[in-house]
Image: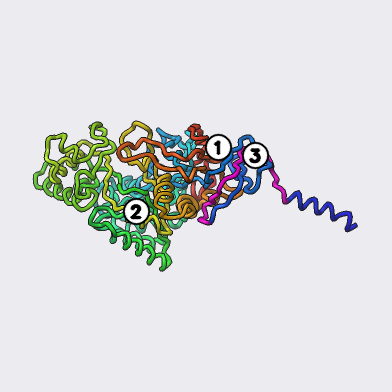
Amino acid sequence: MKNFFFPIVLFSLLLFSCKSNDHYDILILNAEIYDGSGGASYQGDLGIVGDKIIHIGDLKKSTAERIIDAQGLALAPGFIDMHTHLEPLMELPMAESLVRQGVTTSLGGPDGSSPWPLADYMDSLGHLGVGLNVAYLIGHNTVRKNIMGMEDRVPTADELTAMKEQVEQGMKDGAFGISTGLKYLPGTFSKTDEVIELSKIASMHGGIYTSHLREEGLGLLNSVKEAIEISREAKIPVVLTHHKAIGIKMWGASKYTLAMVDSARELGLDIMIDQYPYTASHTGISVLIPSWALEGGPVDEFTRRVQDPLLRDSIKQGIIFNILNDRGGSDLRRVQFSRVSWKKELEGKTLHDWAIMEGMEPTVENGAELVITAQMNGGLNAIYHAIDPEDVKNIMQHPMTMIGSDGRLSNPGNGHPHPRAYGTFPRVLGYYVRENQLMSLETAIRKMTGLSADRLGLTDRGYIKEGNYADLVLFNPATVLDKSTFENPHQYPEGIPYVIVNGTFAVDDSQWTNAAKGKVLRKNAAISH
């Protein structure tokens, strides 16, 4: 009897050990697999059925509807952008400027600003169809403006309760946490206690806190201290988002901020960082203007104030200070215009160029007058070349640093965007890994994938693992490179021939497919579209 059953048992074991599905929708062969863990890469094949990774191993005898020979290519999890300006997503739902970089998941709602109501907006995206997976934070500035407008004061007890209720609603709607933009209106008017109380609500729902710090120039160290205090008091994981040291006088300060992060982590606080790999930031021209001058209305109230000679002089002196000590970088050439709706010919030009165009001496004082003019016309967006390359390297090498573009969705011919909108992730791989050997390829990919997935609590993305969603990127480590520059930003990267979002090619043999296979991700919610 035993002899009769032994062959049957042996056959069953052999059958079980074989791959249960030898036909796939997509089969990737001969890839160098970087699984997102930061561990060593390995040679292997990968099979996809539907939107999931089904098998990893030796699949050369298998068949598929589509077979990719990935010899010479690296296979990585799709990149996760931890800080994206997705505001134009309704107009650019395929997000080509991001996806062509290998990004398959993007976190929106940064710097304190998010859609509201969040659930309605995410429902609309789900019905529209998007080219990559998107997740959102609930913005502190959005909530404060909803309840208090642009007023510079402490909220009443009822107003604080109302803000808490909106944060609560945002978290129930599927937000992954709360973001602040303490440099921007009206968040700059808030006290730390207010932010702590609102962050406690996000923490109760397992959310994170991402902070555009109150200051990234001369007040940087105190601002990092404030973020750490918020983490401690609200018991919430914190991300110092687009971390940097702005202004020549602060160059080298990253060694102190990173030491502060390390000390906080040693005390048990969960502090992390995200970063874009460039020596220039990008934001509105109002960042050069004292915040008090913008209270109540960044155009109308500002215009009223500058009509008063005494107030105008005070505002001008504040702008001069910021040009000399903060994002101005002590040189009008360091302020480069990206989007100017009311004077398109300025796009790509600098504050120095504008002064010359107006027949003015390019002095800091005249630069301040032009900043006033710009704000009175509705403002503009600008690139600020005021970051030390060594600080960029120091921050990138920190083990708790993830990658986030801080880029705004862009399409060719529209404005003069920061090159990070097209080149963030390939720049890390090409310029910092291959050319500068700042870190290993395994480490860089970890910072773009698994580390970010862990931060967001995504258990089925960010790693190449059987059963996970098939969000994947195939790139050539020898050629991958960003092409977008500050002079000519509208250029897609090279060396990324394949991007797969939820099992469907978004980029196929370097060709754009226009596939809308992204999902709207909701934390603490059972549904995703």
- Whether residue 151 sits left or right of residue 201 in the image: it is left
Q: Which mark, residue 24?
A: 3
Residue at 13% from the left image edge and 42% from the top image edge: 366
Residue extending farthest to the bottom is 267
Q: CA distance from mark 3 to mark 2?
A: 43 Å
Task: Please report whichever mark, 2 or 1, sits nearer to the chain's N-terminal start.
Answer: 2
Segment tinted magenta in the rendering: 17-39
Place of residue 204 in the rendered image (x, y in percent of width and height, measured from the top left) = 45, 57
**Which of pointers 3 and 2 indicates the residue nearer the eye?**
2
Quadrant location of the N terminus in the rendered image: bottom right
Residue extending farthest to the right is 1
Q: Amino acid at mark 3?
A: Tyr
Report whether residue 95 is seen: yes
Q: Are marks 1 and 3 in contact (CB under 8 Å)?
A: no
What residue is shown with label 2?
A: 392
Residue at 34% from the left image edge and 59% from the top image edge: 227
What residue is shown with label 1?
A: 504
Task: Please report whichever mark, 1 or 3, sits nearer to the chain's N-terminal start.
Answer: 3
Q: Amino acid at mark 1?
A: Thr
Task: Please report whichever mark, 3 or 2, sits nearer to the chain's N-terminal start.
Answer: 3
Q: Was residue 205 drawn as part of the magenta stretch in this picture?
A: no
Identify the element where label 1 is drawn. strand
Place of residue 490 in the rendered image (x, y in percent of width and height, measured from the top left) = 36, 35
Identify the element where label 3 is drawn. strand
Q: CA distance from mark 2 to mark 1?
A: 35 Å
Q: Sort mark 1 into few (<14), some (14-19) or many (20+) by Cα contacts within 10 Å.
A: many
Identify the element where label 2 is drawn. helix
Front residue (pair 107, 8) = 8
Q: Quadrant of residue 305?
A: top left
Residue at 31% from the left image edge and 49% from the top image edge: 279
Instruction: Indicate how the structure is coloured in the image.
Output: rainbow
